[in-house]
Amino acid sequence: MPDEGWPADHELLRRHVAGDAEAFGELFRRHRDRLWAVALRTLCDPDEAADALQDAMVSAFRRAGDFRGESAVTTWLHRIVVNASLDRLRRRAARPALPTGDEQAFEALVAQDGDPARASDTRMDVDAALRLLPPQQRAALVLVDMLGFSVADAAAILDTSPGTVKSRCARARARLLPHLAHLQGNRSASESVSPAQGGET
Amino acid sequence: MTHLDTDVLAEFRAGLITGRRGARITAHLAGCDRCTALDDRLAGVSVLLASVPAPAMPDSVTQRLDAALTAEVARRDSPERARGDGAGESPTPRRPRENRGFRLLALRVLAPAAAVVVLAAGGYGLSRINFGSSTSSTASTAGGAATAGGAATAASSAKSATRHANAPAAAPAGITPGNIVVVTSNRNLSRADLAQQVRAALLVPPAPGSTETARAQLRGCVLGLIGDHPPQRVESVRFEGRPATLVVARTGQGDTAWIAAPDCSATNLHVLDKTSLPSGISGP
């Protein structure tokens, strides 16, 4: 029996479906920073991330009755947020000016500040590098490497197989390597690895 | 065998290449410094990504979501909605019963106080993050990196060393699944009478400035261990003289304490020891 002050996620969801006006807010609040991180890092844009998160929250609020408990509630919430984020990317891709794959924009971002010891720079460089990845690879890498989800959980969130998640993460890491090497002060890294190497098979 | 391609190595690391081909890669790595170095840097990508702190949700977004949530609750509670006039977006003036607003904002105290910004010290040779540094000083983390990463790493760690931007103000009581706060202590726990030692540890409130937000790997580890149970304490300690993390959660009648290894993660719940504490120990 879960603690009174800390009801399990599925219990909060059950209370929400039963009409409890506070339960959903409590549930969402519990996971909001991670959900925000997923949306922000998948979309690489705070405004778009806020839109996606709001869409996802409203969708989860309304569709809570559909939750059948095949997965953990957190998995379900993350899936809705990831889908809302990828939907936005797809819609954006239909328009020109695709934000991913722009190597020049990346170089410009990285060149803005030369002090490598500042943590905010690291975050900025990582954010810029993430933009280079195709959305599906980025979503997988964010879940596994940045948010610490297991491959199995990430697969459930992304509605794909664990093998696909591993493959997307592997390609993403290989792609990011030359762009993150400078953060580790390892000069030889960028020389020995060609950014163009390795195709998207 | 020619040198390994970055993509091939990345797939190998992810466990996607096995069998005879995997064996050939293993054999090549054993004898090739160049590919081993590449392999280390590839491992460093994940370490670096895990070290980037999760961004806290900006207040403007929190306010927006609060408003949207309040509108949703009002919409659900309103009898008007059954008419389906498409006015779902605008909440009715009637306030829903007991609705005092859904203050995601009010729980800002739970968010990390924009506090500790920790860079993973060291280079790509660093195969794991050292969570067990005994104090919050720069020196201990850089030292851990040097041990784990070797000489090349040590040189660079001086430059990209750990930085603490601000003294953290968050209390451990603010632990939520989205924000695991770690207390740093010099406590040395041992296997014998572990429950009693943990009990003593819980009686001592953490010193001011001794807390920081857990990074992704540790967060995954803690959430994996505690599941739905409310966490009581996450503390960076030493166990039998070696770095470890103490994790305590209320698991029903009493509490459970785990001693997690430094490499514990969501995918690898590496626990060195575990004990249960009878009820009434860790809190009111």
Image (tube, coloured by chain):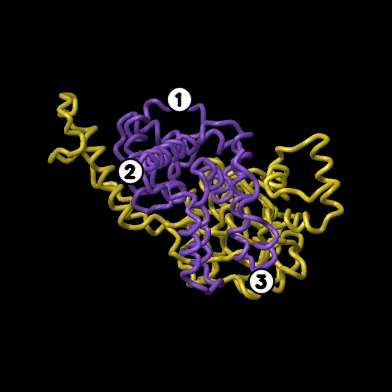
Chain colours: A purple, B yellow
Q: Would residue B22 be seen by someone viewing this image from the given angle?
A: yes
Disc 3 and disc 1 in contact, CB within 8 angstroms = no
- SS of the residue under disc 3: helix
Q: Residues within 10 Å of mark 3 (few under 14, many from 20)?
A: many
| Mark 1 belongs to chain | A
- As drawn, the label of residue A68 is 1
Q: On the image, numbered disc 2 is attached to which residue?
A: A54
Name the residue at 71% across, 68% down.
Answer: B153
Which residue shows up at 59% across the image and 31% down it?
A161
Q: Position of residue B98 (x, y in %)?
A: 23, 41
Residue indicated by mark 3: B157
Subunit of label 3: B
Front label number (2 vs 1):
2
| Residue B34: numbered disc | none
Cα separation between marks 2 and 1: 22 Å
Q: Residues within 10 Å of mark 1 (few under 14, many from 20)?
A: few
Distance from disc 3 to disc 1, alpha carbons, whole Å, reads 49 Å
Q: Nearer the viewer, residue B190 or B64?
A: B64
Is residue A33 or residue B4 the one in the foreground?
A: B4
Q: Chain of mark 2?
A: A
Q: Real-space Cα distance between discs 2 and 3?
A: 41 Å
Query: What type is the residue that disc 3 sits on?
Result: Ser
